Amino acid sequence: MDKLIVHGGATLRGAINISGSKNASLPILAATLLTAEDCIIRRVPDVSDTNYMIQILSALGGDVERSSGTVRATCADIVDHAPYELVRRMRASICVMGPLLARKGRCVVSLPGGCVIGDRPVDLHLRGLEALGAKIEFEGGNITLTAKDGLRGAEIDLRGTHGPTVLGTDNVMMAATLAEGITIIESAAAEPEVLDLANFLNSMGAKITGAGTRRIVIEGVKELHGIEHTVIPDRIEAGTFMAAAALAGDGVILRRVCRDHLKAITAAIEQSGHRVDFNEAGDICTVHRSEITRGVNIVTAPYPGYPTDMQAQMTALLATTPGISVIKDTIFPQRFMHCAELKRMGADIRVDNGTAVVHGVAQLSAAPVMASDLRASAALVLAALTAKGSTEISRLYHIDRGYEHIDEKLLMLGADVERVKDH
C-alpha cells in the first residue's frame, strides 16, 4: 500500500488542468450498456473507481478499451449478472442496474458493500425501478430485477430523507429511456453530473427534458445508438485545488473548470477572504490567497448548494483560518472522520451531531494520519501543505479512488510531496 509524505511549507504556483468528472464518468460508462453500438467517451479520469466500472463492463461481456483519457466501449453481447467481487468494491456500480434491466429485461446485481460515510440505502433506486414495472427479489445478497414484458413509463418521486439521490436519478433515467411511454421523475437530483448523463443519453437518441432541474421527463424510445462524448470537468477536484491554493498558493491557475458548477464553492472561499478570478469563458480560474481571512458558516445542501463532497477540504482550510467557523453537513451527518485526524495535527475542532465548530489556529504540525474515505484523505493532504514538518498520510488508496494523479499535480504546482510504498 502507498502512503503520501507531504513536507509542509512550500508555496504553490503555476497552472494545472482539472480532470474529467469521476461522478459523471461512472454512470456514463454504465449507460454504454444501453446500446450494442460503439461509444467513445473522452476525459474519463484515470482513477480506481472508473477502472472498476470498466472491469464491470468487461465482466458483463462488453468490449472495452482504454487509452489515456479515452474509453471505447462496445456492449453488443452482454450478460445480465454483475459479479459480487467487482460490485462490492464500489457503491456506484449499482448504476448498472437501470441500463441492464432496460436492455435485457432482467438483471442480477450484488448489494454493494457498506460505506464509511454512513448508510446510503439503495431503496430509492429500487422504488423507482419498481414503479417502471420491475419485479424485485432478494436472495443471497443479490438483487434480481425482472421485467418480462418490458418497462413502462410512470410518475416517480425520488425524494429521500437527506435530499434527492444522484445515482438513483441516474438509474431510473437510464432505465426509462427504453421504457414504453413517458416517465416523470419528481424530486430528481439537479447535479451537473446528472445533466451530463442526460446529454450523453440524448445524443444516443433518448428523449429527455428537464435534466438539471428537480423534474425530469423521459419519453421512451425503441433503441439507442453509439456516440462520442466528452465528460464535464470534475468540480470537486477543482474545488479541492481551489482550497489548496487558498491555503498555500500564490496565484494558482486552474484550467478546464466550469464556473457555473463552482458557484457555491467559490462563494465559500471568497467569504473566508480569498479571491477567485475567472476568465470570460469561465473555464480558467486564478485563486489569490489573502493574508486577511475570517471564519465562515457552511451548510451542505444538494446542488446548487454547497456540496458535501467539499465539506472535509473546507474544514482543512478553516482549521488555520482565524476566528470561528461552523460547518453543518445535512446530507451525511456522520461524515466527519477527518476531524479526529486533523486534531492530531493540532486543529481545534469540536464535532457534535453533524456539525463541526472550528476555532482557527495559527499553524498545524505534522503527524502520522490515516485516510478514512476519499474526501477525508484530500482534507489531510491540504492540511499537511502548511503544517510544520512532514506529514505521513497512509491508506492512500482512498484518494486514488477519485483524484487523478493528485501527487503529480501538486508537484507541478511546487508542493513538496512524495509517494512511497508503505511496508
Image (tube, grey):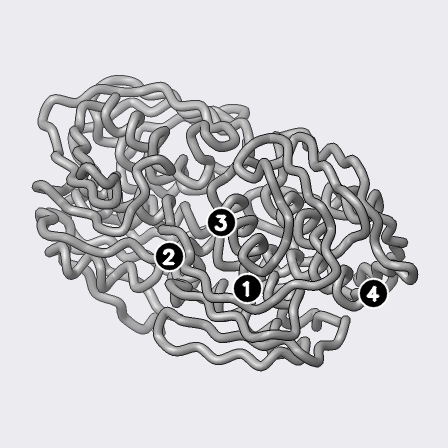
Amino acid type, residue under disc 1 in the picture: Leu
Q: Earlier in the sequence, mark 3 or mark 4?
A: 4
Residue on which the image places disc 3:
196
User: Please, is residue 201 above or below residue 69 in the view?
Assistant: above
Residue on which the image places disc 1:
29
Camera-nearest residue between 72 and 50:
72
Residue 94, image x and y in percent?
Answer: 66, 57
Q: Secondary structure at mark 4?
A: strand
Residue on which the image places disc 4:
106
Q: Earlier in the sequence, mark 1 or mark 3?
A: 1
Q: Secondary structure at mark 1?
A: helix
Residue on which the image places disc 2:
20
User: Please, is residue 126 above or below residue 41 in the view?
Assistant: above
> Residue visible at 58% across and 36% down?
210
Amino acid type, residue under disc 2 in the picture: Gly
Label 4 Cα crowd, 10 Å radius (few <14 / some 14-19 / many 20+): many
Give me the C-alpha separation between circle 2 and circle 1: 13 Å
Camera-nearest residue between 346 and 67:
67
Q: How many marks?
A: 4
Amino acid type, residue under disc 4 in the picture: Arg
Label 3 Cα crowd, 10 Å radius (few <14 / some 14-19 / many 20+): many
Q: Earlier in the sequence, mark 2 or mark 3?
A: 2
Give me the C-alpha separation between circle 4 and circle 2: 32 Å
Give me the C-alpha separation between circle 1 and circle 3: 12 Å
